[in-house]
Image (cartoon, grey):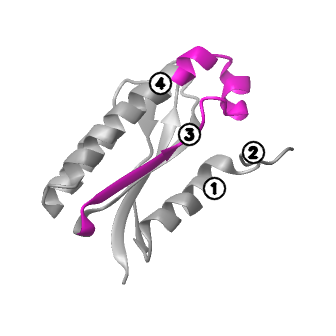
Amino acid sequence: MKYACIYCIVRFAPFAETEEFANVGIVLTAPAIRRMEYRLASKELHRVNHFFDCAPVFAKALEMAKNELDAVRVMTATEQEDQIVNHFRLLTEPKESLIRFSAMRSILVDDVDTTLEELFAHYIIRGEALPGRSS
């Protein structure tokens, strides 16, 4: 069975004045089945730490994002479909923050977990070495 999902790319943007960002995660919700899942990069993501040169800030931003995403995931399990979409909108709306989100995108999926991993591989891992592999 296919599920309608909404997803956003999670972005790390440490310097507002330059508007530069790096994709560091995916957040995906399937309102019809009351699921919201996410995957964030490791705080050791070389591409981010090398480009921005702010590893401690990146690690703290990921920790704060994880806490917020976990809270929304818990709410998702008990809410109605329209409320889940509203929570997702509030989570991902533009804010002045180190963690930002892309515009919402929709997708039809067979499996939420597989799709999350595929989106993460496409937008975040790209050419990075996968865990357990040497470059």
Marks 4/2: CA–CA distance: 20 Å
Q: Residue at x 34, y 74 (%)?
A: 3
| Residue underneath mark 1 | 121
Looking at the image, the residue that sits furthest to the bottom is 1
Would residue 35 be counted in the magenta stretch?
Answer: yes
Name the spot of residue 17 as percent of width and height, x first.
52, 18
The span picked out in magenta is 33-59
Residue shown at 30%/59% (left/top)?
Answer: 35
Q: Earlier in the sequence, mark 4 or mark 1?
A: 4
State whether residue 35 appears in this view. yes
- Mark with earlier residue (1, 3): 3
Q: Earlier in the sequence, mark 3 or mark 2?
A: 3
Q: Quadrant of residue 71?
A: top left
Which circle's residue, 4 or 2, is located before the other in the chain?
4
**Structural distance between the alpha carbons of marks 2 and 1:** 9 Å
Amino acid at the residue labelled 2:
Glu
Please report contact status of discs 4 and 2: CB closer than 8 Å, yes or no: no
44 magenta-colored? yes
Q: Going by the picture, which residue comes out furthest to the front?
A: 132
SS label for mark 3: strand
Residue identifier under label 3: 24
Within 10 Å of disc 4 (Cα), the crowding (few <14, some 14-19, many 20+) is some
User: As shown in the figure, which amino acid type bears the numbered disc 1?
Assistant: Ala
